[in-house]
Image (cartoon, rainbow, N blue to C red):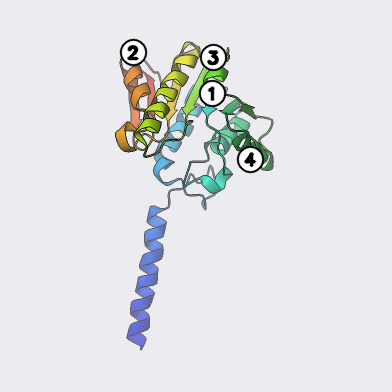
Amino acid sequence: MQYLFWILGLGVLGFFIGKFIKHKSLYPFMPFRYDFRKRRNTFLKALELLDKIQAKIIIETGTSREGLHGAKSNGAATIVLGKWAKLNNAKLHSVDISENSVKVSQEEVNKQGLSSNVIIHHSDSIAFLENFKKKVDFLYLDSYDYSDDPEVQIKSQMHHLNEFKAIEEQLHKNTVVLIDDCALPNGGKGKLVVEYMLKKDWKILMEAYQIMLVRKNFLFN
């Protein structure tokens, strides 16, 4: 009986060790309990570069719908970038076409005490970007949900390309661009926009589930 308990104890210990290894937090920037999993490393690099470039204007397309509870599933970027903005006297503009997503995101922003630094916009992202006239330090593209439907995939990829083109003139030599959901079938959200950027003066800095790009003459690698 004692041997059986010993075996069970090892099994339980192994289970929790496995969970701990898989857990990818942004601690100490965010509480340890939030697991950012496949986005953790690119988010850490993003936070590092936001510091280096002393970002003041951040744009996110596709606002976070679940707050920090969506850290593992959708990344909770609105809260992550919003917290950085609050700590560094910057502004995050997050835009979404869904009225419900905007409502839920605004509630979470208010709950987290970020409303002075995070502005949630209810708009088509391309229209918003076309009319945005300030220089952008950090651009995060994560709108138009991707799916297994090839037609939806193409529409999502075209949408992200058109988002980039809409704001391209407001990107400077040290702007950082991060694109979500790239490690998905048929190239994910970033397929067309990454191809477009690489033909110009951009290079890939990190490539995983997300792809991060900077100018070829970027000063802070």
Residue type at the position of mark 3: Glu
Q: Is residue 164 left or right of residue 93?
A: left
Label 3 to label 1, Cα distance in Å?
9 Å
4 or 2: mark nearer the eye? 4
Task: Please report the residue visible at 42 percent of the width from the left and 33 percent of the height from the top.
Answer: 180
Residue assigned mark 1: 125
Q: Which mark is residue 158?
A: none
Image quadrant assignment for residue 117: top right
Residue type at the position of mark 2: Lys
SS label for mark 2: loop
Label 3 to label 4, Cα distance in Å?
25 Å
**Residue 36 vertical position relative to residue 154 in the rendered view, above or below:** below
Task: Please report the residue visible at 48 percent of the width from the left and 28 percent of the height from the top.
Answer: 140
Q: Position of residue 218 (x, y in %)?
A: 39, 18
Residue type at the position of mark 1: Ser
Residue assigned mark 4: 104
Task: Please report the residue visible at 32 percent of the width from the left and 21 percent of the height from the top.
Answer: 195
Q: Position of residue 110 (x, y in %)?
A: 69, 39
Residue assigned mark 3: 130
Label 4 to label 1, Cα distance in Å?
18 Å
Task: Please report the residue visible at 39 percent of the width from the left and 71 percent of the height from the top.
Answer: 12
Image quadrant assignment for residue 114: top right
Among the two numbered marks 4 and 1 on one chain, the one whose residue lies closer to the N terminus:
4
Residue assigned mark 2: 200
Residue type at the position of mark 4: Val
Among the two numbered marks 4 and 2 on one chain, the one whose residue lies closer to the N terminus:
4
**Residue 111 vertical position relative to residue 57 in the rendered view, above or below:** below
Task: Tell me if mark 4 has few (under 14), some (14-19) or many (20+) residues whose alpha carbon lies within 10 angstroms of its own.
Answer: some
